[in-house]
Image (cartoon, grey):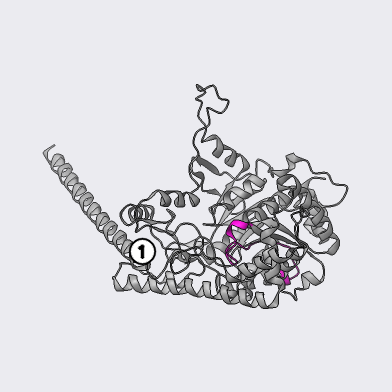
Amino acid sequence: MSISTVALSTKLSGASLLETSLLPKQNFSRSSRVASFPAASRPNVGVQVRNNGVSFTPAQSDSSPGKLHRRTRMSAVAKESDASVSTTTDSGSSFAHVQQAPEDPILGITVAYNKDPSPAKVNLGVGAYRTEEGKPLVLNVVRKAEQQIVADKSRNKEYLGITGIPSFNKLSAQLILGSDSPAIAEKRVVTVQGLSGTGSLRVGGEFLARHYGGQKIIYVPSPTWGNHLKIFPLSGVETRTYRYFDPKTKGLDYEGMIEDLRNAPNGAVVLLHACAHNPTGVDPSQEQWEGIRRVIREEKQLLPFFDSAYQGFASGSLDTDAWAVRQFVNDGGEAFIAQSYAKNMGLYGERVGALSVIVKGAEVATRVESQLKLVIRPMYSNPPTHGAAIVSVILSDKDLFEEWKVELKDMADRIISMRHQLFDALKERKTPGNWEHILNQIGMFTFTGLNKQQVEYMTREHHIYMTLDGRISMAGLSSRTVPQLADAIHSAVVNFSSYMLKWFARSSKIESKLANTENESHYQR
């Protein structure tokens, strides 16, 4: 039975797509990991590969002529590696042909920042929280948990099981779904410890590529966190984008998002940012979330895959930031959730995360867990202990948990304060443009609307380091550096606006002169 036949029979019977794909008698080969499509239905999409990543060219949508969609194939990512390879082999090494790869577009910012000798430099590229003094923060509650762990002489350094610390998995599911979640009570939730958000997403992608009975296509927002565009293609899941951000309003393109989801094939997967969308800081309202849920669940039978990297870090409330996820899970449908504790507990270097899979029955959940183990074992065998132990101690201790919520709220409030300070500073300088989106966006990042040339100017002239798409980490700002950033933004906007006006004026004069010359020549003839 083919995958498409399984999906069709599943739809007719009302059974879970995951349930049919995990029947014991089925045998999935490695070759089935990348979806294939008949030539007639295959989208006409151009994929251009550059040294710094995969770029997309728009093409006609499968289901709606005239609409746009984009996708990434496994071959595109493979070509990305090829793009960094030359044919030089004169050193005698079998690897002499390998060229220097470009720096990661986000982590490379820190590399450039560290090379800058200027004492005035500011790093707003990487999403890591900083104190008002610009220093990395270790939460007090994390230090207390570590002290408990070190003092417990019964702890050892033995291997964990493939799925990690059981208490960590249970507590992580309760944190994102709520301790009173019906799905947990019905044993429809499988949670495994992962290597922060990236590792959890990758395990989920690998599992979908092997076992999902629906369309092995995932739709991610445009724009999205850059790693999404590599994680899923490398997992064997075809990756396309849906409209999300409206550059004109610097807000959510809700109508475009809904239209693209409606044009997606039934049974496809859709990646959703649970809160504090990265890189835009734009989240749907609760009313908009409900509209999105209806399209996904009722109209298109899509599978939601939530990336929850900022729970509690967006609004300051763990429950508020989990609202959208819980709406999707409480409706009885299936879902995937990748969690990270990098931001909300400051455990960046510990690589602590979890993947939860919500299915339609306890028996299906048992089979899903068995197959997740087969994904994890050859990938990294089993997860590390220390970071997950810290999380387990905090989430299981009532006093530590309450203290964590206070510290989490303090971090979120400081970021909100930075937004107001930056907005006020730009207003004081009478910086051209409307900057209210700085206040309206939420979470760690602000999508400023600055273009590549303005960002490069700010780095070159003001030593402000940020991503070329204009994203800045509000968590990296302080009251001391806000004026410097405001000066840089004002200068970039004014100078580049003046430059463009002069350029257009000069171009207009040249065109006018050419037109007059042409007219004179015409009359002379």
Question: For residue 167, which quarter of the picture?
Answer: bottom right
94 versus 428 height, above or below: above
96 versus 498 height, above or below: above
Q: Is residue 337 magenta?
A: yes
Residue holding disc 1: 485
Which quadrant of the figure contains the N terminus? Answer: top right
Task: Give x and y (percent) for residue 355.
Answer: 70, 59
Q: Is residue 403 left or right of residue 473?
A: right
Q: Is residue 246 magenta?
A: no
- 447 or 310: nearer the viewer: 310
Residue type beneath disc 1: Leu
Task: Give x and y (percent) for residue 191.
Answer: 75, 61
Q: Which residues are magenta?
A: 329-351
- 198 or 259: nearer the viewer: 198
Residue placed at 42% from the left, 51% from the top? 114
Q: Is residue 431 left or right of residue 248?
A: left
- Residue 477 in sight in this render: yes
Task: Give x and y (percent) for residue 439.
Answer: 44, 73
